[in-house]
Amino acid sequence: MLRNVFLALVALVIAVGGGTMSAWYAVNRFDGFGALAIGQWTGHPDAGTPLSDPYAKARAAREGAFPLGSAEGLAFYAYDDDKGAALDRRCTYSLSGNSPNSRFWTLYAADRALLPLDPGSGRLPALHSRQILRGEHGTFVVTVSPHAQPENWLATSGSGRMTLVMTLYDTPVGSNSGLVDMTFPAVTRISCDG
Amino acid sequence: MGKLLRTLLFGLIGAGIIHISVVLLVPHYSDRNAWSRISAYGNDWQFHTVTGETKPGTARLAFDPLFQAAACRFDITDLPAHITGVGTLPYWSISVYNRQGENIYSINDRTAIADQLDLVVATPLQMIELNKSKPLSAENSVLIEADMDEGFVVIRSFVPDESWSEQVASFLKNANCSPLL
């Protein structure tokens, strides 16, 4: 008798504990299905639309964000460099290559919750495609570093993990026409402090 | 042994049921969704500047640092919403969201008529009326049919550098959000 009560309690604890923990994890950490991954960059074309899956909807309801519409743009996030190591704010990275078709794009460094980092006074918080210097074939190199760099420099500061956010505005990338040239700059680590 | 396995199985099934119900219920019970953020800015039928900082307890808003935005919430049960704005900017875009914060329609300056911000959000029933006789004030408006009652719009505008900041701010400040009579 007592054994049965005990077993029922165990089942309840597993159900309530496991259910809430996994739901909490899914809502706070999981971005939802349907990600578009190109190189180290991932985007969520369906995020914030009525077509998004329940996990993405739950997460959006907790964040209270206003996701970009399909005619507005699409944000892509890079969490790791090309070796698979997490991006660190104390390291210097080079982003080289080209960007997919869009009217313009912006690039900034953010924390894990995607909030833009404050690079310190007098430094630009973000770069955009109309101000950067390009090579002869339209390619560009952006150096993400806590130290001043020549040419295109995206300043970072502090320590801990970071996420690079590249938002393409007025872009056909989210539509699946298959006619879009999907090239994203590669994120390569150059050096690290300390 | 069999009993222990059965207990584990029941526990896991229960965990699955709770997991699914929590995930499905979060959007209905969340008090920190986009709608409560917009409501905290102020009155409806009025544009408010979107800021990253909010009152404690709500998540900070992840927002492109090179953009400024303004939001207006409305209720189109009785009258359609008319959103207008005048100005020449490098880029602007506008999104219509329903009460759940889902993006249901968006346009940018290139897809708008003559680069002007002028749109009407109407319910399907109001749309029939609008198609029969369009008010003079909404002659060149982009008409958006939305099957909803409460909703909001967010205008975003690109600030390439500080020199544009003032012009963009005045565009957002002078944007108008009012019932279409």
Image (tube, grey):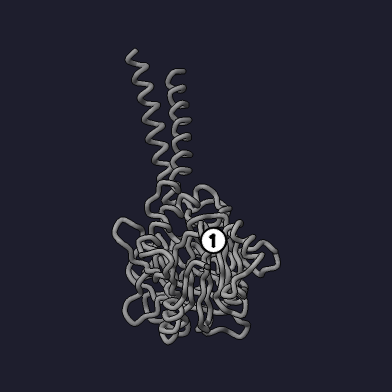
Subunit bearing disc 1: A
Which one is in front, B181 or B169?
A: B181
Residue at (42%, 69%) from the top-left corner? B46
The C terminus of chain A, quarter of image: bottom left
Horizontal arrangement in the rendering, residue B59 relative to residue A74 (left or right)? left
Expressed as whole percent of the image width and height from the top left, the position of residue A71 reads: 59, 68
Residue A115 in percent (x, y) is at 39, 65
The quarter holding residue A102 reads bottom right
Residue ID at (33%, 66%) = B53
Q: Quadrant of residue A140?
A: bottom right
Please give the count of numbered marks on the rendered protein: 1
Q: Nearer the viewer, residue B147 or B21?
A: B147
Residue B94 location, x and y as percent?
A: 52, 69
Q: Is residue B1 above or below residue A75?
A: above
The residue sitting at 42% across, 37% down in the picture is: A19
Location of mark 1 (residue): A42
Q: Quadrant of residue A108?
A: bottom left
- Say which element carries label 1: strand
Residue B22 picture location, percent across and down: 44, 41
Question: Around disc 1, counting alpha carbons within 10 Å, would you say few (fewer than 14), some (14 to 19), or many (20 or more)?
Answer: some
Q: Is residue A98 visible?
A: no
* Residue type of the residue flagged with mark 1: Thr
Q: Residue at x 30, y 61 (%)?
A: B55
- Quadrant location, the N terminus of chain A: top left
From where the camera sits, is residue B57 visible?
Answer: yes
Which residue, as the protein is rendered here, is positioned at the far left?
A: B56
Instruction: Please identify the residue farthest to the top as the structure is shown.
Output: A1
Q: Is residue B181 left or right of residue A16?
A: right
